[in-house]
Amino acid sequence: EGLYHALLRRSADRAQGRPEYEPEPMTFPGLEGEVAYDPRPISKAGSERLIRMGFEVAETRNGAPLDGVRRVSCIDKSNVTRGCQLFRKTFQDIASDYSGTEADYGYIDAFMQWMTRSPEHYDVVVTSNMFGDISTDLGAVLQGGMGMAASGNVGDDHAFFEPVHGSSPKHAGLNKVNPIASINSIQMMMDYLGRKNGDEDLIAIGRLIDESVAEHLKDGRSLTYDIGGTATCSDVGIGIATRLGDKLKER
């Protein structure tokens, strides 16, 4: 859904040898010359899946860093676009099922300012594809850069987890990049698998990975160049793995 709907449709058509999808021609009164546009569909069913997952994730967390309040923020542009109006209405309907979690609202432009000024206010944020694609890069910078940012792509039956940053050919073989994004992605995977399968051991391991990373960063003696240190990728990885190993022995 969202911004990438047409792109994914065209990719699927090419892969299966079908004529590529193109949206129906439209006219835009007042615009002259060549005009291009992309459809940005938002469905109620897709919004429900995302928003309900957001509230369920919030129930597993300790609330926003600022005040400890369990909070889910709906970020949209419902003052302009009809797709976002549907998204917000769906959010409001679902929020009523989670009385123990605060429902929060914001427009995407104002949200970018608020997240820069007061990121501690936010706990879980739900938004549409395009707005999420943009705002998560800012979120990565606020937590220390792309080397810190993990991600998960979660469906109804399957999921995969990866660092936000993708590949970095210019750093290949230099042993200098920050491994924490990869480690945090594993932490998210453990937590997801544990909750999906009712496996408390996996949930506990995910929590211990999170604690190990936090303690390593708080110690501050072994950090990669992107967050102000001189340590190698291996130094950081071994340091966190050692902390995790000690914690696992204590269980």
Image (cartoon, grey):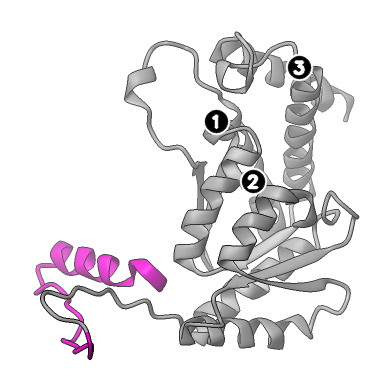
Q: Is residue 17 magenta?
A: yes
Q: Is residue 58 magenta?
A: no
- Quadrant of the frame with the N terminus: bottom left
Measured as percent of width and height from the top left, residue 223 is found at: 65, 16
Determine the CA span between mark 1 and mark 2: 15 Å
Q: Amino acid at mark 2?
A: Met
Label 1 sits on a secondary structure element that is: helix
Determine the CA span between mark 2 and mark 3: 23 Å
Measured as percent of width and height from the top left, residue 34 is found at: 11, 74
Disc assigned to residue 188: 2
Determine the CA span between mark 3 and mark 1: 16 Å
Q: Amino acid at mark 1?
A: Gly
Total labels: the figure holds 3
Locate residue 102 relative to residue 54 in the image: left or right. right
Q: Which of 173 and 208 lies nearest the eye of the viewer?
A: 173
Residue receiving disc 3: 220
Q: Residue at x 70, y 15 (%)?
A: 239
Q: Which of 109 and 232 lies nearest the eye of the viewer?
A: 109
Q: Which of 58 and 36 lies nearest the eye of the viewer?
A: 36
Of the image marks 2 and 3, the number of the one nearer the N terminus: 2
Q: Which stretch appears magenta?
A: 1-30
186 w.r.t. 62: above or below: above
Disc 3 and disc 1 in contact, CB within 8 angstroms: no
Disc assigned to residue 147: 1
Q: Amino acid at mark 3?
A: Gly
Q: Which of 205 and 99 lies nearest the eye of the viewer?
A: 99
Q: Quadrant of residue 187?
A: top right
